[in-house]
Amino acid sequence: MVNNDHEMTSGHLHPITGIIAETEEFFSTLGFTVAQGPEKEEEFYNFDALNIPPDHPARDMQDTFWLLPLGKKQLLRTHTSPVQVRFLKKNKPPVRVIAPGRVFRNEATDATHEAQFYQVEALMVDHQVSLAHLKGVLEAYCRHIFGDQVSIRLRPSFFSFVEPGVEVDVSCFKCAGRGCSLCKKTGWIEILGAGLVHPNVLKACDINPEEWQGFAFGLCPDRIAMIRYGIDDIRLLYSGDLRFIKQF
Amino acid sequence: MKVSYNCLNDYFQNQLPSVEIIVDLLINHAFEVESVEPYEDDFILELDILPDRNHDCLGHRGVAREIGALVNRRPIFSIDDSLLIDDKQKILVDVKEPRLCRRYLARRVTGIKGGNFNQLAKRLSAVGQKPKNSIVDLSNYAMFDTSQPLHVFDADLVKGNLVVRLARKGESIKTLDEQIIDLDNSILIIADNEGPLAIAGVKGGARARVSDKTINLIIESANFEPVNIRKTANRLNLRTDAVKRYENDLSPSLTMIGLKVLSLLLNNQLLSKPSFGPVFDFYPKPEEIRHISVSISDIENKLGTEVDVATVKNIFSRLDFTVSEDDEKITVSPPPDRLDINIKEDLIREVGRVIGYSKIKGCLPDRPTDKVPMIDKSFALTSKIKEILIKTGFSEIYSYTFAPTGDVAIAKPLSADKAFLRTDLTSNLKEKLEQNLKNTLFDHELIKLFEIGSVFPADSEDLRLAVGFSQVAIKGFKPDELYHQVMADLATGLAIEPAELEKTKQNSVVGNNFRVIEFSLSQLNNIRQSWPKANLSAWSKKEIKYQPFSIFPSIKRDIALFVPPSVTADDIISVIKQNAGPLLVSGPILFDRFDKGDKISYAFRIVFQSFDRTLSDDEANQEMIKITVALEKNPTWEARK
């Protein structure tokens, strides 16, 4: 009998865990530490404290899974941004944290949309934190993940909890900007949303926005894994199928 | 929102730069452009207006003003309102709810005769509007121009005066599309002596609708409070163009612009000139002019780049802000419909985006020196456990938080089998073990999986670890041995006693050919002040490309042969690989070898699978024949049959 002993070979890390680990490794070199918060979240932390008022169209951007009984105003967090608020309410600035975790959106699933996915939220608050710092940090991060040849661009965007808000694109590493299917012929791949922390969020955390400022961003490890490895269906990440996992 | 490039051009004295340049400017300085499609002699831009620009950019004028700022040209928005006014055509409207209806303009227009306006109808179709009736089309056109929703009533079908009031319980309305809707006292309506005529700001009613027979009109140009509009529209499930604009909050100043633009269209586009009554204007609390100040150092601090006063003032005036300056600050008043401009951060954004974020040079913040980084203990624990398990052959899966049963129910679940939050990881892990067994090559191949994730029993949120293993063959399966090995590996790696780990055990299920154990990491995390450090990123693959796999069933076949001792297994494998077609997806894997006399017997397993269909036995047999024939071309090789 030939020994086909698979027991001694090592197993496989889920690609999302891999991306989160690399992300944590990069940010720890800049003095960021990990913070975590609950997946079952209160409306206050998920929306109100993040400058998203009730009955505001901005809440439509994040279709929410509300939990029963509705009177408890509990939900599955739609982003990891509430960890910002929880952390700032407990810790005095300056702060540098990243918050990896699972988030949920009540939307129909297909190859590019899942009702659950991961986010890594990053928050830096200090006396002087600018868009230039945000850009520098994200540029270095994208090079850490996608290679030294990539660059990034910031475009105007809107998220209630930041101002200014930006969308961040990374230059397409597959075609080097010439245009291919990965970047939909634009030369750029949208990878995350970011901005400078809105003064109302700082105020909600009892921090004086005249004294402190900060940046925040939220990236999606699922998306980064899909882009980096060429995964064509997000649902594979949650399939528990070893034919998929064993490739990583 | 769809906008027409030609319409935008109409606001400028000279031709705008090419559509490509405009799109590029919008993407980098304003908002996303989803697509650009040619339409006859025009281009239609699909804009994804940002939520904070839905106040002013859901009409062509707003977008033209934005483009004007970016190309540094001033659009011309003047409206010739030298209409002949017939003072006898006065109209009075009784607004009972000034909180919900912040401004109400109305005007009678008499002597309408149908129109012929191909050019405008074409533009409406270009932005996705089906032409309906000349009057309705003109009011839609005015809305797409100004952002201001406009409504028209057939004046001869209105009984008595218009009233803006809350509906009464028991009232109902038949809408323009013949739907009967029951109203209640949370819904604002426009009514006459006979009852509801329209759901304010949401949808018109059938009773006083304009038709081709309409001769006399009442134009409504109103401003409604956004939250009530949104609640009403959501409750009645009526998502109209008017709702989209009102729920985002519009400036009451737009009502007058909308009314004037529609009046002018009626004056110029119909077969004969109608007669216009004076404008009724209910506007109890006029908007106040906003003054917002910002200093150059505020801007530089937040953008992280140098700016000069002249540039900043120039940007503000290009955006049509009125600008004044004292020693330290620049103070601006934005146009009234720029409801997104309220605090200095908004002004900093305007400067940043108009200059262009590409002009900001990235720099890394200094490393903090005075602070000892705090370690998140729970993250350290999960990282370490993942490392231990990967090293000992377990693979990590992520499954769904949703479950068919549980303690916490979801209000609007995606489906009945996802109506609750999971209360354990074990059930899923067990299912995934079974699923993966189907894809194993050998019956004694051990599947080893784990998952770390939150579960939601009753009122808590508990971080759990589930570890499981399984194989097809019951014979030779040693669950107890494996179990003790896992416990020992985890305990050693975490520098704790197996008994401490045992205490956190939540579930343990064992069957003939599987075992799953579940622990509470929330509990485990409490027993130590710190955890050994893991180096998980070393396990993250950086260079690989994912290879899609087929979802169709595979067929396993074995092939065995006698060969002389000089022949190696690799020799045979290469012949098999060369002669197997593209259906070979796995193997050959050597699983048996023995000596018999002067020959050696080798046995291999191979797997056939197609990417586009379920293979038949026949197809697999054909492949096997091809391989066998190729192997037996070597006279000393003898396939065992």
Image: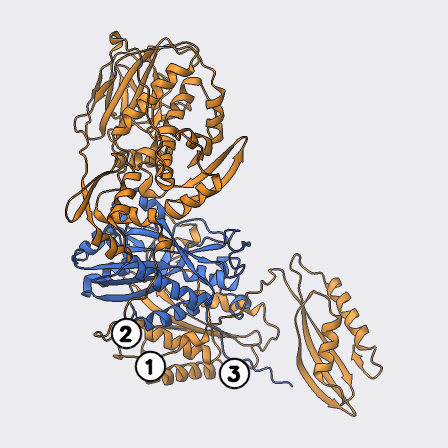
Chain colours: A blue, B orange
Residue at the spot 49% in from the left edge and 76% down from the top edge: A11
Reading the image, the residue beneath label 2 is B375
Q: Chain under label 1?
A: B
Quarter of the figure that contains the C terminus of chain B: bottom right
Farthest residue to the left: give it: B327
- Residue B440 lies left or right of residue B523; in this view the side is right
- Which of A58 and B90 lies nearest the eye of the viewer? B90
Give amino acid for label 1.
Pro
Residues at discs 1 and 2 both on one chain: yes
Nearer the camera: disc 2 or disc 3: 2
Give amino acid for label 2.
Ile
In 3D space, how far apart are the residues under numbered discs 2 and 3 (Cα atoms)?
32 Å
- Which of A89 and B637 lies nearest the eye of the viewer? A89
Reading the image, the residue beneath label 3 is A8
Q: Position of residue B18 (x, y in %)?
A: 48, 39
Check if mark 2's residue and mark 3's residue have beta carbons within 8 Å: no
- Which of B268 and A107 lies nearest the eye of the viewer? B268
Please determine whether, in this image, residue B64 is positioned above or below residue B496: above
* Residue B532 numbered tag: 1
Q: Chain under label 2?
A: B
Disc 1 crowd rating (10 Å Cα; few below 14, some 14-19, many 20+) is few
Please determine whether, in this image, residue B263 is positioned above or below residue B46: above
**Label 1 residue SS:** loop
Residue at the spot 21% in from the left edge and 46% down from the top edge: B343
Give amino acid for label 3.
Met
